[in-house]
Amino acid sequence: MQGIPIILAIVVMNFFLLNLAEGDAVDVLAGEAGSATPEYMEKMRAKFGLDQPLPVQLAVYLKNVVQLDLGYSFRHEMPVHELIFDRFWATLLLMTSTIILAVGFGILLGLFAAVNLNTWKDALISVFALITYATPLFWVGLMMIIVFSIKNDWFPTSGMENSAAFYEGFDRVKDIAHHLVLPTITLSLFYLALYTRMMRASMLEQYGQDYVVTARAKGLSERRITFVHVLRNALLPVVTMAGVQVGALIGGSVIVESVFAWPGLGMLAFESLFARDLNLLLGIFLLSSVLVVAVNLVVDVIYCFLDPRIEVN
Amino acid sequence: MNDFWKLFSRNRSAVLGLLILCLVIFVASIASLIYPGDPFLYSKYPLSKPGENGFLLGSDSIGRDVASGIAHGAKTSLLIGLIATFAAVLIGVIFGALAGYYGGLVDDVLMRVTEVFQTIPSFIFAILLVAIIKPSIESVVIAITVVSWPAVARLVRGEFLALKNREFVQACHTLGMSDYRIMLKEILPNCLSPIIVIGSLMVATAILIESGLAFLGLGDPNVMSWGFQISDGRSMLRVAWWICTFPGIAILITVLAINLVGEGLNDALNPRLRERN
């Protein structure tokens, strides 16, 4: 349960960041309205509790966050938590497909590289990983659009579905899947490279263990050693890494969603930047932090499941 | 120094990276000579293809020279990358050294703080910081620093933990040296190699973060940068592929070169860390 103090610290930091920003909610409202008298603004501040001393405001903020009240987005004229839950599913879909693609292919490629150690196949995979590490996500996305949407009209450039077509049932699923292809590939490339390298390193480490020597001495075939013994042990660190990287994945989805206009949390964050909608941005930040803590918890549990020697503490 | 170079040059891709990096630094330093004047200045030749109207890499929607933008952007990227990394290393070393050297409560408190910063999704945090402080070179540097230092702190703490009970440190205690002097003059020089390696790799990450921020419109509006060029060329993707493509290649090549140099430094300076992931 070390997650709770971390989340608490993030909430408190959130509060101070909000106070650091120039102007408060009343200034924003007054700006929206065009003009407001100082007396009216004082009254509004009193109404929102902004005239209270900082510790009192912090206590109120904490209470609100616990009740899932993340404030009000003046731009969207909606409570922040409703907006976030509206957009959450699109991001979840993108992230899930990305993790499956990246972890799946990463494991396969890493395995392939380790089995073909120091051949041209291994070298090719290493070069791919090096280049992918150095490429900015947004640029990959734009190049994908040039190649696969503009030069060849294979995939749509933006959005999550063709809303003008009014697809229903299976057709709609197909349409969304079609829109999902480019964003998923873009977002997963970096993690694919990461998992490939991890998997390769992990396989090589396992090959050096005593039990592999034993297996060879027993006369097992190399194929059996690789797939039955080494592979299973090599998977462990890759699973942990998948958890650690979730925070980075959320950051990446801000970029990818704004490139492909994917209507998820990242796109919402991008829009809130332009609208200077800080309440919304802070809400998204808070939720993604909570998500990271939650995923790390889940990974801990999976880890114990995979390796009974480790206990949850 | 000679030994170091022998070890470093054994890794041929690291030497290649160093060459590319020198080229990028060279272009950045002569940017104002080969492209004098404001890179934001527009001309009467919008959307020229690469090679047309004297634009080596084409021009954008209002006739700005893409090549000039890349040369001036190189300065921005390298500068932000270096300053942010330097600041992050400084903070990380202070945190890590204090935590590792004193242990106990100091270690607990400092490491909890580090943990919080490591849990936070760093890119979103950087976005948030720049948005709140207002986009400028300073705010971008601050944001990158704030999200980068925890890795250094962890590394330095580990090194200090390993070194603080060694005999030479005990000898310093017996001599009556102050804690401050032991940390700064005795232990720190012994863990410089991993710090240099992690720092060099962090410059690459910093450049990637900077370009991402600029792409989202969070760069300094008065300074040319690669990320800005790409985000600006986005709307012209259909008619002018070159506006987005070339600055992206510049980022790719620079970051790749720095990563290669970092790996080379790693191999040359600490063989122990070779299995770094």
Image (cartoon, coloured by chain):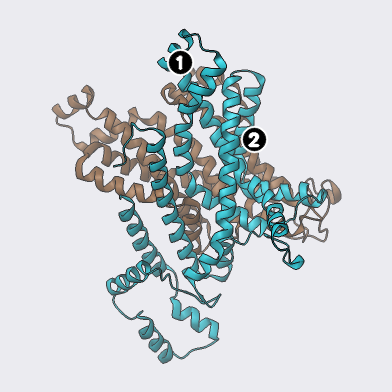
Task: Please count the marks in the image.
Answer: 2
Query: What residue does disc 2 label?
Result: B23
Letter of the brown chain: B
**Point 72% across, 45% down: residue:** B246
**Which class describes the residues within 10 Å of circle 2: few (<14), some (14-19), or many (20+)?**
few
The Cα–Cα distance between marks 2 and 1, rounded to whole angstroms, is: 47 Å
Amino acid carrying label 1: it is Val
Where is residue A185 shown, x and y percent of the image?
65, 45
Q: Does residue B163 appear anywhere in the picture?
A: yes
Q: Nearer the viewer, residue B137 or A128?
A: A128
Circle 1 residue: A212
Q: Residue at the spot x=24%, y=30% of the render?
A: B164
Give the percent coordinates (x, y) of residue B16: 62, 27
Label 2 element class: helix
Residue A110 occupies quadrant: top right
Residue B22 seen in the current view = no
Q: Nearer the viewer, mark 2 or mark 1?
A: 1
